[in-house]
Image (spheres, rainbow, N blue to C red):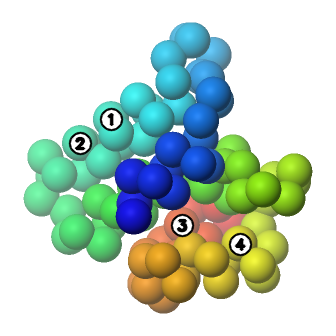
Amino acid sequence: MLINLLINLFIGVLRSSDKTFLAHLVGTASILVDLKAPVEVVTAGLLHAAYATGEFGDGGRGITDSKRAQLERAFGQKIEEYVYGYTL
């Protein structure tokens, strides 16, 4: 489920280095794993840019109640709150 959402949110999105955004997210999560972060934090690391950069199918960027509900349904309140807090 996480992989499918990541692909849908970030397909075709590139960083200024021309690396895929997915590579950036996996790199972020890898650092968190090395730091022995809890699984919720690692998962949030994979999703940290969802609101700012991800494509939820509405053509817009940023936080909305609908996007928050979608992430919460998929991953739980705690992970969504981490992503939300990062975005703020």
Q: Earlier in the sequence, mark 4 or mark 2?
A: 2
Local secondary structure at mark 4: helix
x, y percent for residue 53: 69, 45
Q: Earlier in the sequence, mark 4 or mark 3?
A: 4
Q: Earlier in the sequence, mark 3 or mark 2?
A: 2
* Residue 22 to residue 85: above or below: above
x, y percent for residue 2: 40, 60
Count of numbered circles in the view? 4
| Closest to the observer, 59 or 23 | 59
Confirm or deny contact between disc 4 and disc 3 (CB under 8 A).
no
Q: Earlier in the sequence, mark 4 or mark 1?
A: 1
User: Residue drawn 61% across and 71% down?
Assistant: 84
Gap in Å between the C-alphas at discs 4 and 3? 11 Å
Gap in Å between the C-alphas at discs 4 and 1? 24 Å
* Residue 81 to residue 39: above or below: below
- What amino acid type should be assigned to the residue bearing mark 3? Val
Q: Earlier in the sequence, mark 1 or mark 3?
A: 1
Residue at the top extreme of this rendering: 18
Question: Which residue is disc 4 drawn over?
Answer: 67
| Closest to the observer, 69 or 45 | 69
Q: Between tags 4 and 3, which lies in front?
A: 4
User: Residue drawn 44% across and 85% down?
Assistant: 76
- What amino acid type should be assigned to the residue bearing mark 4? Lys
Question: Which residue is disc 3 drawn over?
Answer: 83
Question: Which residue is disc 2 drawn over?
Answer: 30
Local secondary structure at mark 3: helix
Gap in Å between the C-alphas at discs 3 and 2? 17 Å
Question: Which residue is disc 1 drawn over?
Answer: 27
Q: Is residue 85 visible?
A: no
Local secondary structure at mark 1: helix
Mark 4, other Cα within 10 Å: few <14 / some 14–19 / many ≥20: some
